[in-house]
Structures are given as C-alpha cells and as structure tokens.
Amino acid sequence: MTSSAQPFDGYLIGTDIGGTFTDLVLLESGRRPRLFKSPTTPHDRSEGIIDALELAATSVGTTLPRFASQIRYFAHGTTAATNALIERKGAATGLLTTAGFADTMLIQRSMTSWVGMGSATGHYSRRRNPEPIVGRDAIVEVPERVDAAGTVLVALDEDEVRSALRRLRAAGVQALATSFLWSFLNPRAELRVREIVEEEWPEVYLTLSHEISPVIGEYERTATTVVNSYLGPVIRDYMENLEGRLHATGFDGELSVMDSGGGVMRASDAARRSASLLTSGPAGGVLATARVADAMGFSNVITSDMGGTSFDVGLILDGEPLVERQSEVGNYHLAIPRIKVTAIGAGGGSIAWVDEVGALVVGPESAGSVPGPACYGRGGVRPTVTDADVVLGIIDPDYFLGGRMTLDRHLAEEAIREHIADPLGMSVEEAALGIRTVADNQMADLLRKVTVEQGRDPRDFVVFAYGGAGPTHACAYTQAAGINTLVVPPTSTVHSAYGTVTADRFRALQATDPPRTPPGADDPASTLDLDRLRSTLADLADRVHADLDHAPEVRFVRSVHLKFRRQTHELPVVLPDGEVTVDVMRAVIEEFFETYERIYGKGTALRSAGLELNTLRVEGRAAVAALAPSAPFEAGSLDTAQIGTRDVVFGEVGRVEVPVHRGELVGSGAQLVGPAVLEFEGTTIVVGPGQELTVDANANIIINCKGN
C-alpha cells in the first residue's frame, strides 16, 4: 500500500466470490496475510462470506460479533453482474431513445453479431445475434433531436415521455434506460426525463446515457446504458443484502466493491454503476499481481486465475495492467474501460465428457459448488478436473481445504470409469490423465492466444498462477505454452480477494468533446481551443475528486484519445501534470504519431489528414489504508517441511513416488527439483519432473518450468 494512506488500526478484509469457493483474506498491521476459503452458497452468496468470516474470527480466537466490530475496512469482488448478464437474469428493462433510432440495440454494428466467432467470422450460416436484454416492444421512440454541435433541433416531447412511462410501467418494466442522440454534448433532454420520472415513476431504476457513458458512439453508449439498467436492480439488491448480513454480524463500516477499471468504489456507487462490475472479481487478481510483479522486477506478466469454474487470463505490460476502452460481454459492446481479462470454462469443477464423435472434452460446463465434483460426495456424478487430480494422486483427499473437507477417491474413480474410461476403452488412470491433459492444453492455448495473436512473444512473459486450482495445473500449462518462469505468490489461493483489499479507491470519468484540427495544418496544436480543453479536464477532475470525498492524497492521471479525421479507431496518450499548453499538445500529438506508426507500421501516420481529440479521460486514485510491514518470512528446511511421499501420475514419466511438503513450512531460500508436491490449506502446488523451484525472501514460489 502507498505511504499516502491514513494509518490503520484494526482488521482489513478482502473477499471474492467464485463459482465454487468464496475467498477471504485478513490483513492486520505487523502480520502476514491470513487466507480462508469456504464453499460458495449459490442460493444466497452472502452466506459463503459469513462462513469465511467465521473462519477468520476463529483464527484470531474470538467470536464473530467481536471480530466484525473490529473490521475497519471491508472490500469485495463479485461476479454477480457477469452472471446476471450471461445468464440473462437481469431486470425487465425499457429503453427511451430518439425517434428513428429504436433499432440501435438490435442492429448493433454488424460486427457485434460476430463477436466471439473467431475464424468463423464472415460465414453467414454461423452468424448469431445475442439474446436481447430489452425487447422490441419495450423500446420507445421519443420525439427529440440534438445535432452534432449540441444544438436542439427538435424539443423533447414531454407528453410522449409521460405516455411512454405509463405504458412501460403497465408492462412490468422494472428498470429504465434513456439514450438520446448526442446527449453527451447537450444532456438537457435526458435530465428532463429524470425530472418527469421522479414525478411519474420514482421507484424505477433509471440510467441516463450521458452520465454512465458520455462518449461518442451511438450503439456502444446505448448498450452500456441498457446493460447498466438491466443489471442495476440485481446489483442494488445484492449489495443491500450483503451489507445487511455484514451489519448483522457487528460490522459497522462501509462496504467497498471492486471496480472493473482497477480500484474500489463504495457499494452505493456500485449499485448506480452496475456495468462497472462486469470483471470485478478477476480485476482484483490482476491488480494484486501487478504489485507483486513490480516488487520482483517483472514488467511483462500473464496472470492466470484457475478457480472451480473458469480460467481467467490478463496481461501486465511494462508494469501496467492492460486496460481495454471498450469491452464485449454477453455479445454487447460496452463503452466502459476495464482491465482486460479473457476467460474460458476451464476450472477444477469443469465437467469432462465424451462427445458424439468419441473425443474427450473438458468444460465449459461446471459442477460448481452444488453438487460439485463427484469426489465431494454431494450428489455430483459426472467427472471433473478435480476428480482427475484426486485419482492421479495430485490432490490428497484427506487434506482438501486443510483437512476441513474430505474427498472421496472411490466416487471420483467411478465417475471417470462410467463417463470416460469405459466409453473410450481405457483405464481409469489413463482417462484421468487424459482429462488433466486436455484441460492443461486448453489453458496453454489461451496463454498463447492473448500473446501470440496480439503480436507478442509468450517467451517474453512470466506467468503468475493463483486461484484454488491454478498452482495445481500451472507447471503444465506454463510449460506447454513455451514459457519458462512461473510464479505462485503466497496469497495465491485467495489472490483476487487480496487484490480487492489492497487496491486504491478509484474513480474514472471521461467525456467526448471532439475539437478537430484542420487538414494540412503545419502546427495542429496551435489550432486547438485550449481553454475549452482545459475546462473539460478541470470539470472531470473536480467530479472525480468529489466522488473520492475530496481526499487530499488523490493522484490524478489525465489522458486524451486521438484519431485521424474520418477514421474510427483512436489511441490514448497520457497528459503530463500541470497546465495544458500549446507545447504540451505538440508533444502529445507527436507521441500519437509515433505510437500510431509503431502499431500500424512506419509511414502509416497521415500527418496532413487532421486530428480529432475524441475523448478526454481523468482517473483518480487514493490509497485506503496503511499497514505496518508484516513480519519477515522465515527461512525453512525442506526436511522439516516434508510430510511424506505418495505416488503421483505424470504424463511424461508415468507413476512415480514424489516427496510431499507442507507448503506453509517451505520457507524463503528453499530449493528443489521436481517432481514434488507442496500442499497448502487452500491449494496444491505441483512441480513437474525436472522443473526447478526456489522460494524468494517474500515467500513467492518461483518455478523454472523448462527444467534442467
């Protein structure tokens, strides 16, 4: 944490709810983080958090009410928004839009109908439109019109607005989105809609496009507005329930929630900006990794989070998490910047099956926490990756979750035999190895996809592995992707939760205010209206500062997104601190030209074409709390840490007897050559044959996957 934060006395809690387990990390001054996992409770996810809090209270030797009363900061990451959108379980939503533009959400941009198609793009027979989240009968056109200069051409027809509200209300709509053309330049019509809604229908959840996404791009702005309203009531109810459960335990503080853009915000803000939560949980892991990687001197990192349901991958480039300005979720493009995380359905709970042509397939369907893998003994009968790990000797059935949960190897074997081994005519052990290999190769393919397909060499990166299952499989998928170095941080089992509690408070605002430079200008910077530019940036900064409670330690980052006139794509350039002058803008424009040619090739920058300063963005960050340094990690002896041996099956060498170490006792400075297994309470680290493990002074486990 940064030194600018206020000194802290008490407990800090970070949580992250996954599809299978709920993670919690407890921080207190002078102590190393304490890590806890409890099964996720799908019927009411707040119960899983309370269960994890009970574990934390027990670990400090007190009751839950007393423990909760000493919590001074509580941060939370969640997949609630993502799940609701993908599963189409949001609120019934209506849309008010400018007359003549009712089909914006349905037409999209043509390209949106091909999102996720990969190599199939362009094959009309495989084209699929997303399942609508707002029906055509719930889209109402309203007479009003503003032009590209913000001038009112047609005044808002207020009678039509009132009539539309009554019709939508009678149809059972619960949330309302309003997106008028060019409203980000002149929002008066949308603001008047709010006033009318307060008179006619005050209980409806309302999103105005100029507030949630004040940027150019009719479709993206409308989609973002609709998605925010679609998810809004779900997230509002989720936050109210969670806060209520926490306050019932004795916690009297305010809940903070992970923002997909790279920080935390108040729960009340999250309820208003639900679309900002669509990668809430995974973003925490990427932020935590960036901190650890920076301390270790790694600037280019692939983050890999393997939980029970999914495998999430992010990139850190030159020390900074990769952020995308527009993102695609549920086949809709959203104009809300977020830390880029790519996910596939590959986790410990991913179900293995044999398809119609006799091929072994793993995922994307997951057994989740209920019923869970067959070995959980909770009614699951289909084999999963976790079942395969148990059969192969990788996971000790008697030490799952530190022994709090016992797995049934026999049930795992029977599930694999019935659904995989017998249909394919192989042994249970061969089938289990096949399941693990398929899953590992799928994850290695994703590591290659996020690097090679973007023109980056995976060999230039270090992989960080975390999540309950990540360290168990990372040695295999890292090696298969052609990457040498793997790092497992000491908080790996709850790394995303650790990221939520160590993240800064964060707020970002952007606005489209597109001044243009004339074509052929020798000095385009001198043609800009800098007073207007400075005014817009100052307004954004004031609003960001207000959202961060005017904290004096707020750190601001300003950026301008430029593009050539009549082009579509734009590139961001960070503005230096201080006054924006002509000389500053000359340097910014030159950096834009250089960046453009670095990406698209030398000579591609059309310097005489003229420029558009399309979007202005201001980010603010403030550290939430300061902790005294934790106790140093002690040097450990491998002999002391070793608790025995057991047979483990590896694809390269078959069944071998390997040493098993209690992970928490493998202290700094330890070194070993695989194969070996390190068992922690929340995860199992596997070191493959010939791979080399070392532990640094901060208990980061570093594995050379190339081996000797």
Image: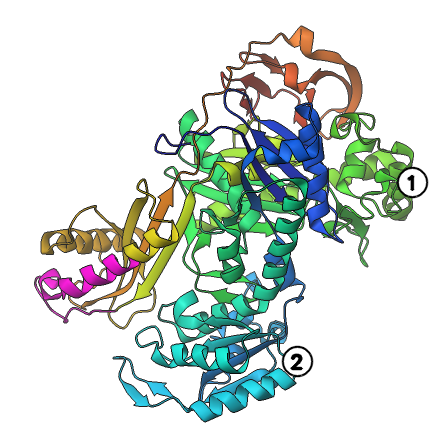
Relative to 664, residue 147 above or below: below
Mark closest to the chain's N terminus, 1 or 2:
2
* Badge 2 amino acid: Gly
Residue under label 1 = 414
Residue 416, how many percent across, how many down?
86, 42
Q: Nearer the viewer, mark 1 or mark 2?
A: 2
Mark 2 surroundings: few (<14), some (14-19) or many (≥20) residues within 10 A: few
Q: Which mark is residue 172?
A: 2
**Left/right of residue 567 with respect to residue 436 in the rendered view:** left
Q: Secondary structure at mark 1?
A: helix
Magenta span: 514-540
Relative to 453, residue 28 above or below: above
Can see residue 36? Answer: yes
Residue 382, how many percent across, how many down?
85, 48
In this view, the residue in front, 181 or 593, is 181
Mark 1 surroundings: few (<14), some (14-19) or many (≥20) residues within 10 A: some
Residue 96, how many percent across, how many down?
49, 82
